[in-house]
Image (spheres, rainbow, N blue to C red):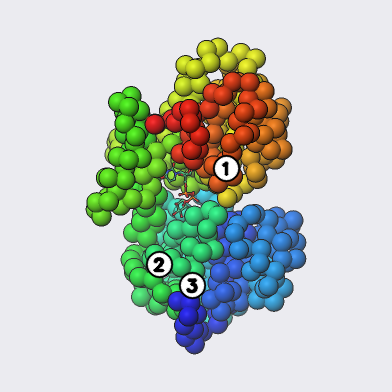
């Protein structure tokens, strides 16, 4: 019997989810799986249309299947806030992109709070507003709560507030939502927290109840710690490479200590994605705004900035000047199993290759068209073999499993100079970034 479906009688809640992006959509569809009725509030009319037709606007394992099953029945999307009028719960899942100084831009949080408040004016029952977006400590307390209360003309007896961070990995988000390691519920009072806990009655996981600000800080700290593990491994990896030691063997030995753990110690070209770089930068910005000098976190980011450039340096060491040389870049997504290129480590590498006058032939199983928006004039190959044909060098940037099966394709290269930024190739003669 699956752990999740030891179904207790769930109070079937009416839930509005503001934001139909990756977090909002996964949250919405998983809440349906938990037995609730969901309306996604999304400003982009194309996304609304797609969701209502059962077509997710993003690629995420398992999402399409669940959406097809429930679209128009237990989940619907709308561009207005009408569903908030009789909602038991409203989740805020809007984006918090980086502002000009690296601090989190909270304009979507502000406008969502205001619109939720306006609709809650007409809601006659008790409703809890839950922030799921990753926000700087203090945001729910000092920005969301006053904005909602002001616009709704109500008090905290009628509206509760909570912060429930997400710990979803892209590509595995549905699985992570339904089988989490923990559920963190920050709330302004016990009544709000109890209502949030009810949503997750059918999930078996440790539940940690905290205040609003602590819940926000738990999310930032989790991502900062994971990113620190990666930059730490990369720095050790850079040292190991010079000493002729295999960093993967080292980290295996180190990670067996349960106080350290084996995960997130894979050295390579650094971390990308929509979360780690943005969240650690925002945490640095929070620290500075209160007079702290976060030297460790800044170093984590600096190692991550320098790391991908090493790929180009190693290539030059082997090939000399890169002017007019054909270089295959395999992998454009920030990790495997996604078409997301946000902060992908392939981006700084391609910039540098182009600056040095190389001819870049790029290939990714899913992310080619996304990368075309940043680099419209690259050669985008339709297979790894096509990118490799006649290439004098190859950089492997993403841990796609299909790359680990490449073999004869490398024989198509004019010169077999291959540098991997993720440890996936077993072929002899391949140089690793840290090994
Ligand atoms: C990350 C966290 O893992 C989630 O727990 C969190 O909820 C999410 O951010 C978020 O804040 O929403 P995600 O960005 O999907 O999830 O990606 P990860 O799987 O964590 O990988 C991030 C980057 O680190 C990738 O570029 C990956 O290649 C790199 N990485 C990961 C390494 O270089 N080494 C490792 O050992 C692990």
> Closer to the camera: disc 3 or disc 1?
1
The structure residue drawn at horizontal position 70% and vertical position 29%, both measured from the top left corner, is 379
3 or 1: tag closer to the N-terminus: 3
**Dots 3 and 1: beta carbons under 8 Å?**
no
Where on the picture, by quarter, is residue 289?
top left
In this view of the protein, which residue sits in the foreground, 45 or 243?
A: 243
Residue ID at (47%, 85%): 8
* Disc 2 Cβ-to-ligand 1 distance below 8 Å: no
Residue 319 lies, in percent from the top left, at 53, 16
What whole-number distance in Å separates the C-alpha atoms at marks 3 and 1?
Answer: 50 Å
In the depicted view, which residue is nearer to us: 162 or 390? Answer: 390
- 60 in relation to 387, above or below: below
- Residue denoted by label 2: 183
Which of the marked residues, 2 or 3, is nearer the chain's N terminus? Answer: 3
Judge whether 181 appears above or below 302 on screen: below
Mark 2–mark 3 CB contact (< 8 Å): no
Circle count: 3
- Say whether residue 201 is visible: yes
Instruction: State the image coordinates of residue 390 (x, y, percent, origin top left).
Output: 67, 23
Residue for badge 3 = 128
Q: Nearer the viewer, residue 47 or 138?
A: 47
**Residue labelled with disc 1:** 405
State the image coordinates of residue 109 (x, y, percent, origin top left): 53, 55
Residue 26 quadrant: bottom right
The residue tagged with tag 1: helix, strand or loop?
loop
Neighbourhood count class around disc 1 (C-alpha, 10 Å): few under 14, some 14–19, many 20 upward? few
Front residue of this view, candidates 380 and 46: 380
- Looking at the figure, which quarter contains the C terminus? top left
- Residue depicted at 71% across the width and 66% down the height: 54
Q: For numbered disc 3, what is the local secondary structure?
A: strand
The extreme bottom residue here reads 9
């Amino acid at each position: 019997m699956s752990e999740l479906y030891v179904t207790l009688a769930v109070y079937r809640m009416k839930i509005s989810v503001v934001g139909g992006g990756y977090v909002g959509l996964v949250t919405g569809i998983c809440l349906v799986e938990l037995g609730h009725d969901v309306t996604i509030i999304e400003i982009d009319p194309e996304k609304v249309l797609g969701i209502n037709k059962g077509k997710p606007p993003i690629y995420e394992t398992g999402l399409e299947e669940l959406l097809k099953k429930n679209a128009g029945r237990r989940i619907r999307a709308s561009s207005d806030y009408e569903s908030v009028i009789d909602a038991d719960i409203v989740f805020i899942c809007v984006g918090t992109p980086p502002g000009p100084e690296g601090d989190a831009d909270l304009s979507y949080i502000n406008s969502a709070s205001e619109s939720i408040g306006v609709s809650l004016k007409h809601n006659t029952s008790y409703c809890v507003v839950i922030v799921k977006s990753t926000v700087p400590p203090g945001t729910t307390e000092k920005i969301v709560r006053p904005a909602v209360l002001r616009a709704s003309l109500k008090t905290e007896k009628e509206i509760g507030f909570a912060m429930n961070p997400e710990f979803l990995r892209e590509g595995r988000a549905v699985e992570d939502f339904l089988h989490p390691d923990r559920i963190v519920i920050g709330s302004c009072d016990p009544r709000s927290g109890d209502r949030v806990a009810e949503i997750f009655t059918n999930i078996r996981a440790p539940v940690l109840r905290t205040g609003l600000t602590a819940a926000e800080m738990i999310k930032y700290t989790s991502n900062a710690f994971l990113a620190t593990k990666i930059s730490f491994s990369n720095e050790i990896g850079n040292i190991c490479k010079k000493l002729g030691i295999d960093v993967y063997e080292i980290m295996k030995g180190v990670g067996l200590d349960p106080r350290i753990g084996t995960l997130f110690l894979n050295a390579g070209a650094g971390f990308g994605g929509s979360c780690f770089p943005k969240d650690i930068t925002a945490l640095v910005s929070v620290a500075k705004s209160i007079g702290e000098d976060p030297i460790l976190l800044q170093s984590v980011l600096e190692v991550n900035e320098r790391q991908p450039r090493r790929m180009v340096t190693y290539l030059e060491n082997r090939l000399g000047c890169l002017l007019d040389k054909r270089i295959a870049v395999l992998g454009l997504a920030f990790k495997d199993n996604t078409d997301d290129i946000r902060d992908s480590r392939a981006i700084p590498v391609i910039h540098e290759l182009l600056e040095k006058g190389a001819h870049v032939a790029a290939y990714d199983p899913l992310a080619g068209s996304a990368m075309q928006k940043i680099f419209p004039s690259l050669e985008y190959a339709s297979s790894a073999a096509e990118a490799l044909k006649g290439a004098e060098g190859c950089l492997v940037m993403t841990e796609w499993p299909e790359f680990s099966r490449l073999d004869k394709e490398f024989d198509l290269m004019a010169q077999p100079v291959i540098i991997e930024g993720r440890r996936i190739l077993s072929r002899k003669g391949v140089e690793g970034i840290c090994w």
